[in-house]
Image (cartoon, rainbow, N blue to C red):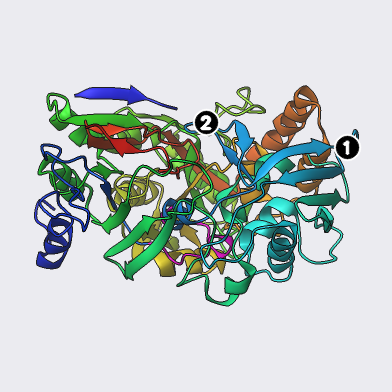
Amino acid sequence: MKKTWIGSLLFSVVAAASIAGCSSDDTGSEGEAEGGDSGSEETQDTLVFARGADSTSLDPAKETDGETFYVTQQIYDTLIQYEDGTTELEPALATDWEASEDGSEFTLELREGVTFHDGTEFNAEAVVANFERWMESEDYVYYGSMFGGYGDDEDNIIDNVEATDKYEVTFTLRDSSAPFLKNLAMSPFAIASPEAFDTLEEDPVGTGPFTLDNWSRNDSITLNKNEEYWVEGKPHLNRIIFQVIPDNSSRLTALQNGEVDLIDGVNPSDQSKIEDDANIEVFMRPPLNVAYMPMNNEEDPFDDPLVRQAVNHAIDKQSLIDSFYEGNAEPAKNMLPPTINGYNDDIEPYEYDPDQAKELLEEAGYEEGELTINLWTMDNPRPYMPAPQKIAESIQKDLDDIGVTASIQTIDWSTYLEKAQNGEMPAFLIGWIGDNGDADNFLYTLLGTGSGNNYSNYSNEEVDEVLKQAQAETDEDARAELYYEAQELIHEDAPVVPLVHYESIMAGVDTLEGYKPAPTGSERFTNVKFSE
């Protein structure tokens, strides 16, 4: 086994047949092998990537889940993108950019000669049309989260987007914005063909290296190579198949059997099973994430900070790490991962202390055994939570120890996300994988008033003001100080329970080349190929 740092046992008949149909025994029209067995005489040109759940749609601007972005990263391009395996910026559809001295205006020079998959031209007018679309509706949750608001709302940091030449676009901001360029590189802000806006959820049209061939809901998505891609000689692969295999162990079995080429969500307890397998390479995704438990701050009983503090003291995070993460995680005391500039290491964590939790509940007016809640968990593993049902059961026991009865509820992933955004689950398990390596993408996105990803419905005017100052501050040391202050205020309010930061495990065949897991949780496969 090779280990690279960058950054149930049975299938259903349908799933097995679907994957087997993609193996290297099949041959394409040009006589080249199309997947599976690395022992084939021909160079493999189909990648079968097995994952735990399906995409919710193929319009990245409307979604917030990594399963969607896994696919849309291959179909669309952003104006600026991250270098493989990092959050460092590099040109994409924009070849160059310049900021005004006060950071309130950005001018981007666009790549010429690029066409959308439908044959229409990519230019500045197309960029303007995309931003105007995102500004017009709260359906585009990420836009409001990252740019502050919609339309003419003064909270919308973007005042105007203008095509100042055929291949030049200028953004005029209402204030300076330190994370603006990093935000442009995020998956939700990929550029789509304006002619296809009405059908993107099912029929995506971008400028990316692959095009949609087929989508079998809750089973597989097949992409074909874009022969007209603007990067010469790329992509190397002719086809990608995203195969849904909900169970982590079954996914690993498929890899070991040569039925798939790459998997995510390897159980920490399964890592030892592949350590001696020379045909498998392990990839560790950098831990730019947080698994956490939001509590609805607007509803009883979680509208009382004493109750929220009690729950924070009740949960044994180290036990979660020892039992379900096999040591590949660290307890979270802040929502911000320690690797991000602005992390406040001086914060004192809510130590595991059931007695203190009971005292806080009593102070809040609850006698032991009086409080009953619903605790929701997802029905499939996530990159930040390899065993959601078992983790929920462990938390259920912790809460029972302080006299709180928690009834575990679950539902399918797409509905789960809808309920989270609609505030319909009083307490639930979720996680966040950073989109751009910036503190704003965690603290404002997850806890800012009005942010579409603020699942706890937390609101603190003082915190909002500090976070907005940090957005406008271009000096990184000064920004860090503001984020230190924000984390102190948030910690006192305890709107959520930060659980762990997890270094998730992926695995692939040893013939896979050019693959680098992105810290943001979704990577492009433009440079991926198989060794000959």
Q: Position of residue 213 (x, y in %)?
A: 35, 66
Name the main secondary structure of what is drawn in magenta: loop
Q: Which residue is mark 1?
A: 100
Highlighted range, magenta: 55-67
Residue at position x 12%, y 63% in the image: 17
Q: Quadrant of the N terminus?
A: top left
The reply to whether residue 259 is visible in this rendering is: yes
Q: Crowding at label 2, few (<14), some or many (≥20) Cα neighbours within 10 Å?
A: some
Q: Answer with the quarter of the image where residue 283 lies.
A: top left
Q: Answer with the quarter of the image where residue 510 lies.
A: top left
Between 131 and 493, the one nearer to me in the picture: 131
Say if the magenta span includes residue 369: no
Residue at position x 19%, y 31% in the image: 280
Between 108 and 277, the one nearer to me in the picture: 108
Q: Quadrant of the C terminus?
A: top left
Query: On residue 86, which mark appears?
Result: 2
Say left or right for 246 vs 347: left
Say left or right for 229 vs 249: right
Q: Position of residue 413 (x, y in %)?
A: 38, 63
**Residue type beneath disc 1:** Ser
Between 488 and 254, the one nearer to me in the picture: 254
Say left or right for 279 vs 371: left
Q: Position of residue 164 (x, y in %)?
A: 85, 54
